[in-house]
Image (cartoon, rainbow, N blue to C red):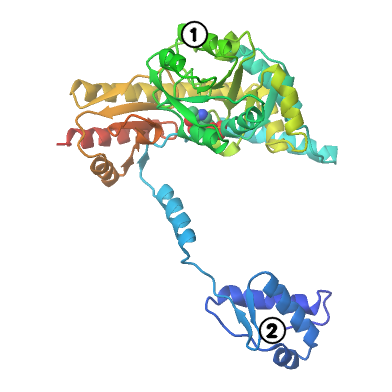
Amino acid sequence: MYHLDRMISKPMYQQLYEQIKKEYQVEAKQVKLPSIRELAKELNISKTTVEQAYNQLVAEGLLLNIPQSGFYFLPAEPDSKWEQEIDNEVLERRQQVDFDFRYGTTFFYTASWNSWKRCVKKAMEQEFLDERSAYQDVQGNDRLRSELVKMLGRTRGVRCRKEQIVITSGSLDSLDIVLNLLKRKSRHFQAAIEDPGYYAAGHIFTRNGFPLQNIPVESEGISISKLALSAADLVYVTPSHQFPMGYRMSVARRQQLLQLIRERQGYIIEDDYDSEFRYTTQPLPSLQSLDRQDCVIYLGSFSKTISPTLRLGYMVLPRHLVGEYRTLYQFDHERAAYMIQEGMAEFLSSGSYYRHISKAVGTNKAKYHLLEDQLNLLKAEGRIDWIPSDGGLHVVMEVLNLQETDVFLQQLQQHSLRLYPLSKYSFSVCRDQFFLLGYGGLSLEELTHGLKLLKQVVQNLS
Ligand SMILES: Cc1ncc(COP(=O)(O)O)c(C=O)c1O
């Protein structure tokens, strides 16, 4: 039964409401409650007090008031179809395997983690000392933008002023903003994406009302001849490390792409998502650095270099789009947590970020070479082919003469291994025998072991 304390300051109806609610959370079945009159009599309180508590619960959807009948707890619906579907989806994603070649997972080393924590702590202390918190500029933290100007200039040849940079919650957020800006222009853009390509980016295009043309990718990058045949004037590309195939767009092709889009007075959206990871050659200059007509919109992210959970990215807008962005987003606030932005500014300015990158490149380079050795052995046996990559955190492998993809995936699962079929990234051509192997989230030891098992499964394929 309920215990109401008249000596405390909390109103009686509130005490009653909280106790009934607690009881409700334990009970899952439909139960009839005592009438208002009965309960008021039993607890020796006024009917208004009970009524207030009941009404609050009705308003929250926890009680049902059936006229002429009374008040009922509403049973929870654990088995409703949509909940079940969502639970299944989450469950599927979570199913653990020992060697998950999932793309997009990263490692943060202890030393880097400690310096990152120091930087965020410093940012928090700074905010605490300021004693005041306020909404900040819609383009993001000023110091971080200044640091990005230096970093992008030095490492990617990007030429920009901090006024052109917008801090976002990642590349996809940046893309969403860009498309939101462009769809409001009087002119209607024809959009194109690489095929195979980044399906998540494609989804953002269609969600913003841009039908997409799929342009095939060749070993030098997006096919310029196919692009020229289309009417596309808004192209999304991943030139440093084509996603997912891993090709690097040649300088000649970069120039051709720029020329074509310039002639069409359109835009190129350059997604430079993992250019920090180069193992064999120096990175080529970004498209933005070659652009003389302000037609490149450059997207960058900390999802690969630090962690996708940070939700921190940035974009460099052509100068003429900055004003449009500020007008369209004038009533929005900064898009990423300010303390994290300030922490990142500190991480960059203290040099810790660069030390972290240097370590991450070293470790991933060793993993890449391990993959290279093992995949080459399987290739020499005529079982697979693969695309050697200039860097990044994943490679693409083709299993030759593969009969049934599902059976292969099940066999991998039995060995606690998971690879990712490329079919998800292929828009027009069926690539069921191609797989994506992400290695960013595996340690060298795990990778060694995982590759050994992969070799066994592939060698046992009939
Ligand atoms: C091609 C490509 N671009 C960008 C991203 C990163 O997106 P975000 O910064 O939104 O995490 C990814 C992540 O997997 C990607 O594969």
- Whether residue 107 is visible, yes or no, is no
Between disc 1 and disc 2, the foreground one is 1
Please give the name of the residue rendered at 35% of the width and 27% of the height, measured from the top-left corner: 396
Q: Quadrant of residue 184?
A: top right
Residue tagged 2: 2
Question: Up-down: is 22 above or below 227?
Answer: below
Q: Secondary structure at mark 2?
A: loop
Mark 2 Cβ inside 8 Å of ligand 1: no
> Which numbered dot is residue 256?
1
Image side of residue 312 versus residue 81, left or right: right
Say which quarter of the image contains residue 422. top left
Residue 63 image-quadrant placement: bottom right
Residue situated in front as seen by the camera: 143 or 353 = 143
Residue 153 is tagged as none
Mark 2 neighbour class, 10 Å CA radius: few under 14, some 14 to 19, many 20 or more: some
Count of residue discs: 2
Query: Under 8 Å from ligand 1: the CB of mark 1?
Result: no
**Nearest to the observer: residue 54 or residue 280:** 54
Rendering coords of residue 425 (x, y %): 40, 32
Q: Quadrant of the C terminus?
A: top left
**What quarter of the picture does the N terminus occupy?**
bottom right
Tell me if residue 134 comes above or below residue 434 in the rendering: below
Residue 186, x across and y down, in percent: 67, 26
Q: x and y percent of residue 394 in the render?
A: 40, 28
Give the residue at x 75% y 24%: 323
Answer above or below: position of 437 versus 68. above
Q: Secondary structure at mark 1?
A: helix
Image marks 1 and 2: residues in contact by CB distance under 8 Å: no
How far separated are the C-alphas under marks 1 and 2?
Answer: 77 Å
Mark 1 or mark 2, earlier in chain: 2
Say which amino acid is labelled 2. Tyr
Identify which amino acid the numbered label 1 is placed on. Gln
